[in-house]
Amino acid sequence: MGAADIVPGVSGGTIALITGVYKELLESINALSWQNLKYFKNEGIKGIWKRLKGPFLLSLFGGILTSILLFSRILEWLFVHEPIGLWSFFLGLLLASILFLIKTELHYNALSFLYLFFGALASYLLTQLMGVSSDTPLWYLFFAGFIGISAMILPGLSGAYILFVLGVYQTVMTNLRIAQDLLMDFDKEVFFKIGSELGVFILGILVGIKIFAKFLSRLLKRYPNHTIAVLIGLMLGALNKVWPWQNPVPKTNEDSPQLMEAALPQQFKGGDPEIVKAVFLMVVGFGLLFLLEKSKRFIKK
């Protein structure tokens, strides 16, 4: 789940479904409440730990954190040295996810398509308004963590993808890498800067996961078809952000963030468009989703 959550296009919730821990994950998160803590007097720490499903949550989130720390450096290197190949893989993965969800989850009626359209429109407008800024305010990092954690709860929706759409994905990945470097080469000033940014981001995650677990559980139970349609629309509308060939948009002034716009390979201004590599990795990404789905069916059997 940790590896999935840092890759734009793969949902940690999907991995939870495939591995059969999705239901227990929702139940465990919902168990973290003040109501359960009142049993401390009679049951003690051991009883509360069991009631809150502590062993499950500790092992699951320990694995997630370990995976994030291991893979964040690799992905950051790929962003710099192999951007076209990386985004081609993500694009193939996302296209397959969208087609799969449309085929298996979307109800073919006017209302569902209307929700899908509004989800796609909202997502597309968001990608046009948000640009990657070198100076991301702390309140925005809290908001990004709060929204991005929904991927751990909802199969089919990528939290890393949301962070990318919001313009903070590379900021978070870079901060994770710097935080690991501080263990070997400590710098007090850098520690406070990175610590405050990651701390606020993690706080957004903790608040978001508790709220979303209960809210989304109810939403999926009451309005499953409409919710799924909006989620598919969100993924569909933001596809332009994962397009491998992006050209910089001329800045209106020096202080404005650098925006990018999708372009055809022959119009790409960043050097060799690497079309053969791009197509190959799109196919690999596209096929990966079906391998995941086959493994899910195998586990069910």
Image: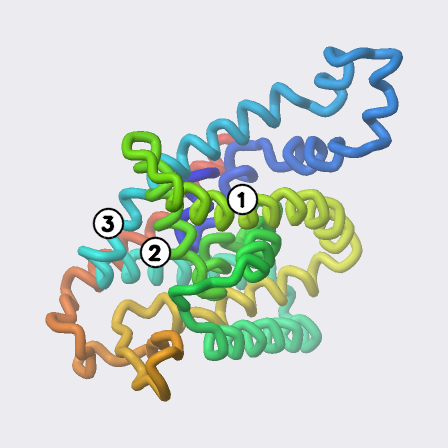
Percent coordinates x, y for residue 72 in the rendering: 35, 43
Q: Which residue is at a point 26% across and 78% down the rendered structure image?
A: 247
Percent coordinates x, y for residue 295 in the rendering: 43, 37
Res 271 → quadrant = bottom left
Q: Is 76 on the left-hand or right-hand side of 214?
A: left
Res 4 → quadrant = top left
Label 2 neighbourhood size at 10 Å, few (<14), some (14-19), many (20+)? many
- Type of residue at label 2? Phe
Which one is in front, 299 or 149? 149
Sequence order check: which comes first, mark 2 or mark 1? 1
Sequence order check: which comes first, mark 3 or mark 2? 3
- Front label number (2 vs 1): 1
Q: Identify the disc placed on residue 286.
A: 2
Whether residue 151 is visible = no
Q: Mark 1 to mark 3: distance in Å?
A: 24 Å
Percent coordinates x, y for residue 48 in the rendering: 76, 18
Q: Mark 3 to mark 2: distance in Å?
A: 22 Å
- Type of residue at label 3? Trp
Percent coordinates x, y for residue 301 in the rendering: 52, 30
Q: Secondary structure at mark 3?
A: helix
- Front label number (3 vs 2): 3
Q: Identify the disc placed on residue 199.
A: 1
Residue located beneath label 3 in the image: 77
